[in-house]
Image (cartoon, rainbow, N blue to C red):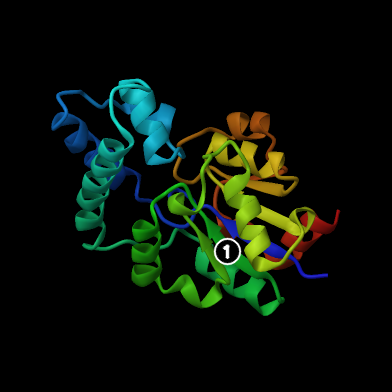
Amino acid sequence: MKLAAIWDMDGTLVDTAELHFAAWVEACRELARDFSRADFAATFGKRNPEILKMLFGPERFTPEEIAAIGIRKEDLYKAEARRGVELLPGVDSLMDSLHRRGFAQAVGTSAPRGNLELILELTGIGKYLGAGVAEQDTTRGKPHPEVFLNAAQRLGVEPSRCVVFEDAIYGIQAAKAGGMKAVGITFVGHHPAEALRAAGADVIVRSLEELNADEVIRLIEG
């Protein structure tokens, strides 16, 4: 039976945290609100509509306003990202080795589709992927498992035959809620190993350089 690897994007494939933080600072400044490191930590891994409701309250903006603010924030982010983004250590080699072992692979991210397409363009990893699920493809954000279940369905792989690579608590919780194995990565440092373990991570590594395809297969097959 086919196996699948589903990748979170920000903080797992690439380290774009500071670009997102700066974009949120500017977007919130334009709305007369400060955006702190604490705000960033509390909302990281969420979709933009959920982040805006957490920051401003559920009734502050209409759906149309939320969409417009989200576009503005992502335009700020993408302008900086185009200056250069690199894959995190171990990503390309592990994706390549999993591909060679017959894994189906997908990205499952809370980010808008434009961000996903930009990262694929800048890093060249689209050659490994059979699917990409972004904010517009879901109605519920992490820790709900919809994004990962959607990815598994598009790949044609049962959730129990999938492993999710994540750096965030919400993402680990989403993977486990979807019946998948979860690898927690601490390289970027948004959440410590203890928090990822408490969220349900089956394996925790500092860098994906610590994993190989055989270990991933053993994790899924038990």
Is label 1 in a helix, a strand or a loop? strand
Q: Is residue 66 left or right of residue 156?
A: left
Quarter of the rendering containing residue 156:
bottom right
- Residue 178, given in percent of the width and then of the height, sits at 70, 44
Residue 65 makes an appearance in the image: yes
- Residue 85, given in percent of the width and then of the height, sits at 32, 61
Quarter of the rendering containing residue 94:
bottom right
Given the image, on which type of amino acid does mark 1 rest? Ala
Task: Identify the residue shown where x is 67% and y is 60%.
Answer: 153
Task: Identify the residue shown where x is 61% and y is 35%.
Answer: 196
What residue did someone put label 1 on? 106
Q: Nearer the viewer, residue 135 or 91?
A: 135
Q: Nearer the viewer, residue 168 or 111?
A: 111
Q: Is residue 48 left or right of residue 161?
A: left
Q: Nearer the viewer, residue 75 or 41?
A: 75
- In the rendered image, the residue lying farthest to the right is 222
- Residue 88, given in percent of the width and then of the height, sits at 45, 58
